[in-house]
Structures are given as structure tokens and as C-alpha cells.
Image (tube, grey):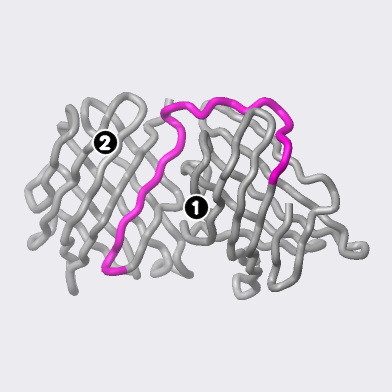
Amino acid sequence: MSATVNGQAFTATQSATAAASSSAAISVYTVSGTRLNGTTAENITLSLYNIAATGTYPLGVNSTNFGGIATYLNGSSSWTTPLSGTAGTVIVTSLTATRIAGTFSFNAADVLNPASTRSVTNGAFDVGITGTPGTVQPYQGSSMKATLGGSAWIGATIVVVSKTGGSYAFGGSTITGTGAAGIANVNVILTGVSGPGTYALGPGQGNQLSVTAGGSGYNSSLSGSSGSVVVTSVDANRLKGTLSATLAAAGGAALAVSGGTFDIGLGK
């Protein structure tokens, strides 16, 4: 494993390894490399969730997602990718039962002092796997993306609230700053889903899209709202589709939601 940390070269001098584990909820690869800088240990760790194939995945997302979290340690100090959905990227270029390889970059912050940050660029790894990788199940891992009022949003933590009798309720949450104004949530309620189709949004509809962003709330049930959710695929394991809408607020200007996509693992 190698990288550049705040402009300084990092090369793991102690063996970089990837430990594989899995459960009914998630599958994890923990890729870690350490070097000694004098008597101080430096470490980079990537915790990658629900990765079943090569591809590009976000860093700064929770174990509910496809992607992961990255941490840089220097002695007793640590910096971790915030749950912003956009803190970095890992590109898995090779994945077998015995090795995992790829590249990465990320921006991390001290949890206790967010003003203290570290920029990790030019990252690369090619390491052997210890343990037996579990098979990522078809119901594991999710992703949600959209453009909210012109700003890109990626759901960092995704939760399925219900999935009963053709009705689905799910949502994604992202930390974009501090306080209530620094949290962006996108929540979807769908009813009467029997297969792929277009489900209208607006006042009086059973389907609903709500967004909280910048300290303001928007909801498709309010007068002046319109839009739709398009379900492109649904089965017992997974719900996929797109969404777009104009959402009214209880007070203030409406919010345009565009380019929305979702790929929701429905759990065991």
C-alpha cells in the first residue's frame, strides 16, 4: 500500500493486508497498511462494505451502502472520512478469493476537531486476503443519489423502514456540515408497487418524496409539488429506480430534485 498524505509520501513497511468477513447484514474487506515514522506508527485503513466486483465506490458512506470509510492514523491522532457521501473514492481494479487491488483518494477529518484534516491522494494497494470472503448477498448494500437544488447529494446512510405488501419506505441521510442545517435527508414512500412503473408525486398522492436540506423541509404532499418515482426493477431482494420532482416548502422557495437514482437492498 502506498499514498501521499498532505503532500508527504506514505509506503507501508509492515505488511498491508485485507481481512475479509461477512454476516447476514454486511460483507466487509478491511484493507490496512502501516509504516513506522521513527517511533511513530502511521496507518491507512479502508473498510469496504458489500463489494462484490471491481468498480468505483464512494468513501464516506456507512455499512448500509456499497462503498466504505477510510481512516488515517498518526500516533495517537486519527482522521476519518465524514459521512458526507463524497469524502473520497476507491476504485477496485482486481478482486479474487485471495487478493484485492485498487486505487484510492480521500479527505478525512479529526472527529473531535473537524477543522483538522488530512488529504490522502495517489493511493494504491495490492494485498493478499486473510479469512474467507463471504458472498455478498443480493439483498446487501444500497445506493441513493440526486441533485438537490443544483447540489450533488449521495446518501451516506441508507435505511429501509418498511417493505410490506407492495409498499416501501426508505431514505438516505448525509452529513454536509454542522448542526441541523448540516444534515441532508431524502425519504421516499411508495404504495401499490406490483412491478416496474411510474408512480406520481404530488398533493393527494399516496406516494411521497420528502427532503430536508439546509435547515429547510420540502414535501411532495404540499400544494405546488409535482414529480414522479420510476421503479425500474423490484423483487424480494432489491428495489431500483429513478426520481425527479419539484417540492414545495411550508414557507419559502420550492426545491428542484433531479437526476435521482436508487438501488435499495431490502434486507434478509
Tell me, for residue 257, which label it has, or none: none
Q: Is residue 9 left or right of residue 123?
A: right
Dot placed on the residue nearer the N-terminal end, 2 or 1: 1
Q: 83 or 180: nearer the eye? A: 83
Residue lying furthest front:
93
- Residue 11 drawn in magenta: no
Q: Is residue 250 left or right of residue 262?
A: left
Question: Within 10 Å of the Cα at label 1, are there few (<14), some (14-19), or many (20+) other Cα atoms?
Answer: many
Q: Which residues are magenta?
A: 126-150
Q: Is residue 223 visible?
A: yes
Q: Is residue 225 above or below residue 242?
A: below
State which quarter of the image contains the C terminus: top left
The residue wearing badge 1 is: 58
Tell me, for residue 168, which label it has, or none: 2
Q: Is residue 194 above or below residue 174?
A: above
- Residue 127 drawn in magenta: yes
Residue 154 rendering spot, x and y as whole percentages: 40, 56
Q: 17 or 212: nearer the eye? A: 17
Q: Mark 2: which secondary structure?
A: strand
Question: Within 10 Å of the Cα at label 2, are there few (<14), some (14-19), or many (20+) other Cα atoms?
Answer: some
Q: Residue at x 13, y 41 (%)?
A: 198
Residue lying furthest right:
39
Q: Mark 1: which secondary structure?
A: strand
Q: Is residue 62 left or right of residue 109?
A: left
